Amino acid sequence: MKVNGNQINPGNIIMHNNRLWRAVKTQAVKPGKGGAFAQIELKDIKTGTKLNERFRATETIERISLEQQDYQYLFEDAGLITLMDPETFDQISVDKNTILEEQYPFLTDGLMVEVESYEDDIISVSLPKQMIVEIAEADAVVKGQTASSSYKNAILTNGLKILVPPHIASGTKVKVDTLTHEYLEKAKG
């Protein structure tokens, strides 16, 4: 799909110089002299190299639509993760680097993930943006702290260290953002 240079948003995949790039950051620039343009930080899908590029508002760029399909995570072996199509039970193996480094600690047996592909090449594997995880350890509450302004250290069952409100104790299930590792709320139920 052809779009104007100023219509590219972070996360979009574009074809540029015969390679696939993901827009990481975009900024609209309106200089005092000359036409407006979009300053876009791009990351190569295959190699991970970064590129800063300017696209004029009148320039057309090929925005790529990726195929998305849900798979179930089975296991990891020698840097490859094995996923299963829940409908056909077909299995695929992909490099573990197709998962964002921030989300990797949340990968658990049986987890449903989203696989994005372009022309049968797997581009990325995404986990849910929020997950419920149990607190393995939590620091004791320091007397005199108020719940609104202070947080304490806690370790999740997956080994990640996060900050939680003082009322959260070991064994409590909490909702966590898988990209930022931030505590969102105590899990309901």
Image (spheres, rainbow, N blue to C red):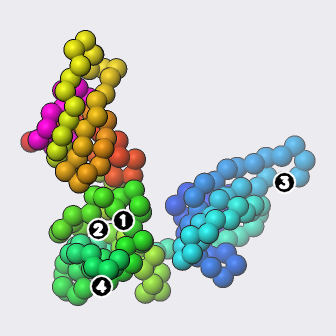
In the image, what residue occupies the spot 75% across and 48% down?
29
Horizontal side, residue 141 vs residue 115: left or right: left
Tag 1 and tag 4, C-beta contact below 8 Å:
no
Q: Secondary structure at mark 3?
A: loop
Residue 134 spot, x, y in % from top left:
16, 46
Res. 48 visible in picture: yes
Of the residues under marks 1 and 4, which one precedes in the sequence?
4
Tag 2 and tag 1, C-beta contact below 8 Å:
yes
Main secondary structure type of the part rendered in magenta: loop
Q: Quadrant of residue 45?
A: bottom right
Closest to the camera, between mark 4 and mark 3, is: 4
Of the pair 183 and 35, the residue shown nearer to us: 183
Residue 31 spot, x, y in % from top left:
83, 46
Residue 173 spot, x, y in % from top left:
15, 43
Mark 2–mark 4 distance (CA, rounded to whole Å): 13 Å
Furthest residue to the left?
A: 189
Mark 4–mark 3 distance (CA, rounded to whole Å): 47 Å
Chain part drawn in magenta: 165-174
Check residue 113 in the rendering and tell me which mark sits there, or answer none.
2
Closest to the camera, between mark 1 and mark 3, is: 1
Residue type at mark 2 is Val
Which residue is identified by label 3?
35
Of the residues under marks 1 and 3, which one precedes in the sequence?
3
Which residue is identified by label 4?
92
